[in-house]
Amino acid sequence: MPHCNKKMISFFLTTKCNLCCRYCYNAKERNKIEEKTIPLEIAKAGIDWYFNNCESRHIRFYGPGEPTQEFEKIKEITNYAKLNKNGGDRVTVEIQTNGVFNENVRDWALENINIMWMSFDGMPDIQNYNRPLNPKYKELFGGKTSAEVLENNVKWLIENKGERNLMVGARVTITDKNVYKQIEMVDYFYNLGIRYVWTNPLFYSVGEIPVCEDNLKKDSYNFDMEAYVNEYIKAYKYAKEKGLFWGSFYTINFDGESPYHCRSCTPLSAPHITTDGYISACDMALLGEKPYHMEAFIVGKWNSKTKKFDLYDEKIKTLNNRKSTEIEHCKKCPVKLHCGGFCLGETVNETGKLDGQNITKCIATRKLYRELGPCEPYKYLHP
């Protein structure tokens, strides 16, 4: 099932975060603004609007900060969705979290979350280097590292889930610290009890201007894509033998055919409600008031006077028309229907254009498809 078929409403819950990740793609812009949390009125209105217009009853909590920093709001939004007269009994809940939370959050998640993606970079030395705890929060966790808290929460959730409809998986950022340790990470996650892992190579942070105009950002980026692909293929095959799924962001459409890469191209089936009351089409366009060069993804806004969302129809139409079958450099590509023109968010961030291209990523995707080919539908789609 192509990734664009993942239909859900996402809530960009808060800009607060309890980690200081070295590669955070939104920290610089997020730290420039006053901390924001999504107003409950807008979140509830988002649920009503989405449930009235879509069959899906899947809700998701995401950044730009760490969603569990607003735990009470997660509970309120979830309860509102589940009690909704329009199909609330069918609601399923997903969260992408850094996993650094207390026992109260953990206990509630066990009973209420269905899909739990932990942002998790592998063994403790790598996790603690890439994703250190924010010093302001160390006392709350008794001086433990992010790896210690995360490991403990993962183990507890998996050991206690019983027959509950709960999947605890890992979403791994691959950097130069762990690119050659993918097989080792397979064993590490397997021993923790995790059976589903999605990896994503390090990508550029989002700033005020596209990467193509930011020489400092380009010069400071360092990632060996060829090494990632070669090591990924080995880890994928090794993981398959162990009964663990080792996925790649570059293979998210290998289980089906679509001219779309992801939900950014179909924003009304998978809208993201921002902390400042806008509808975004993409996880990389986290704020609506000042999206800078990611403006193409802001497709609506909450109207406080009419108490409705105003949609930007022309922008939605433009995104709907972004297809690999129409993009010039994609038309003759043998994997155009298993790639869909690659991640639209990364493309716009890097090139400033909806039809831009990063040839390094094209080469990587083609090689992965040649080596691995099409596959059975994924049980859990990329977060």
Image: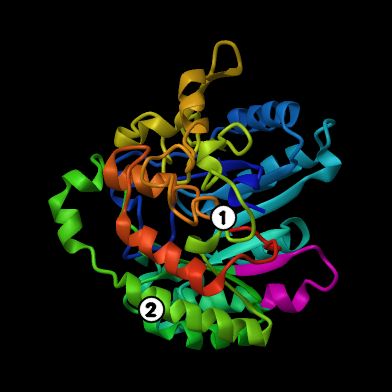
- 85 lies above or below 141: above
Residue 209 is situated, as x and y percent measured from the top left of the image, at 23, 40
Residue 380 is situated, as x and y percent measured from the top left of the image, at 67, 61
When asked about the image quadrant of residue 362, the answer is bottom left
Residue placed under numbered mark 2 in the picture: 179
When asked about the image quadrant of residue 254, the answer is bottom right
Q: Which of these two is toward me, 140 or 210?
A: 210
> Quick check: 117 left or right of 34?
right
The quadrant of the image that shows the N terminus is bottom right
Residues in magenta, as a range: 156-169
- 66 lies above or below 279: below
Crowd band around label 1 with a 10 angstrom C-alpha radius: few (<14), some (14–19), many (20+)? many
Q: Secondary structure at mark 2?
A: helix
Q: Secondary structure at mark 1?
A: helix
Q: Which of these two is toward me, 223 or 83?
A: 223
Residue placed under numbered mark 1 in the picture: 68
Residue 114 is situated, as x and y percent measured from the top left of the image, at 73, 58
When asked about the image quadrant of residue 246, the answer is bottom right
Q: Which of these two is toward me, 367 or 130?
A: 367
User: Which residue is depicted at the point 50% across and 29% down?
Assistant: 277
